Amino acid sequence: MSTIDIGTKVAGVSFRSCLYNASGPRCTTKEELVGLGESHSGAIMMKSCTIEPREGNPKPRYACFEHCSIQSMGLPNLGYEEYLKFVDELAEFNKPVVASIAGLSLNDYVTMTKAFQDSNVSLIELNLSCPNIEGKPQVAYDIEQTEATLSAVAELGSIPLGLKLPPFYDRSFHESMAELVLKYNIRFLSCINSIGNTLIIDADKGTPALRAKHGYGGLSGPCIKPIALANVRIFHELLGDNVSIVGVGGVQTGTDVYEYLLAGASAVQIGTMYEEEGVGCFERIENELGTILKEKGYTRATDAVGALKEQ
Ligand code: RRO
């Protein structure tokens, strides 16, 4: 056991561990969420939900390779009312329960935010970046639609709101988003969602790896880490300590987590690695993080947040 404190706070909420699951893999059913409660995950993050239950896109809809995974899940979930029923039981694990909301319209965001504001969840993540729904562009790439959504949900309750953002590649987008974050009192950002509309081709079969959306899907895993790290660092620079940044993308080891902390993340979510390794990844990576923090002379993970030096 390491003597290093790997706890953190996200939007003022305490986490025993700064590592938890990303919304997506293995967090859709009650059994999976209970499994996260029993695991070393620092929180229980739920699969993004919609108003109605959804089966999701046709299979195959997930494929994993050495340096990346690609999926087009299409928001399979039980519907928000079912998740509301689980919240009290999940809260008994004494770790934060985080709702993830993916509206298919502005009204959906309002309905679901209201409902979770009236529940025992600790945080609410508004997913503004699902890339896999045919005919539904990613909200966060449209600054006006983002503002309309935030203004409609900002004052529906006191549970802190955060945004799951897609990757941005130009600082002007980070700056516009940061302005809205401050204007609407958004308390945390999860950066980044998968890189949308990518294509992997199976040369043997002469087809895309995935069936849905003509094979276009969200790219995740180690190959997206440099993009995610840059998004974390830029938002941390723009927003300082007032808004917690949560890093997501390609975390496989304790060293990856350390890099996210240096870039300015207060916590880190694990997606592809959790899908591939199961709940054991949280304890393994937690131990690896303890080791590297100790090697670097830290006693607390939070002391490494934003500690990246210039070359
Ligand atoms: O379910 C999905 O297809 C999905 C979602 Br909601 C998301 O936010 N990001 C992603 O890569 N897949």
Image: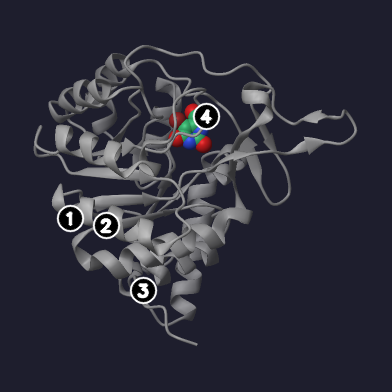
Q: Tell me, yes or no, if residue 103 can be seen here.
A: yes
Relative to residue 175, is residue 218 depicted above or below?
above
Front one among 201 and 294: 201
Identify the residue shown where x is 43% and y is 60%.
231
Among all residues in the image, which is located at the extreme right? 204
Front one among 200 and 55: 200
Looking at the image, tell me whether mark 4 or mark 2 is earlier in sequence order. Answer: 4
The quarter of the picture where residue 8 lies is bottom left
Front one among 277 and 2: 277
Looking at the image, tell me whether mark 4 or mark 3 is earlier in sequence order. Answer: 4
Crowd rating for badge 2 (residues with CA inside 10 Å; few <14, some 14–19, many 20+): some
Q: Position of residue 222 (x, y in %)?
A: 61, 55
- Element assignment for label 3: helix
The quarter of the picture where residue 241 lies is bottom left
Distance between the alpha carbons at the discs numbered 3 and 2: 23 Å
Looking at the image, tell me whether mark 3 or mark 2 is earlier in sequence order. Answer: 2
Identify the residue shown where x is 37% and y is 56%.
173
To which residue does mark 2 refer? 178
Q: Are marks 3 and 2 in contact (CB under 8 Å)?
A: no
**Amino acid type at mark 3:** Ala
To which residue does mark 1 refer? 182
Closest to the camera, between mark 4 and mark 3, is 4
- Element assignment for label 2: helix
Front one among 98 and 187: 187
Q: Position of residue 129 (x, y in %)?
A: 41, 38
Q: Quadrant of the N terminus?
A: bottom left
Q: Are marks 1 and 2 in contact (CB under 8 Å)?
A: yes
To which residue does mark 3 refer? 304
Looking at the image, tell me whether mark 1 or mark 4 is earlier in sequence order. Answer: 4
Looking at the image, tell me whether mark 3 or mark 1 is earlier in sequence order. Answer: 1
Crowd rating for badge 3 (residues with CA inside 10 Å; few <14, some 14–19, many 20+): many
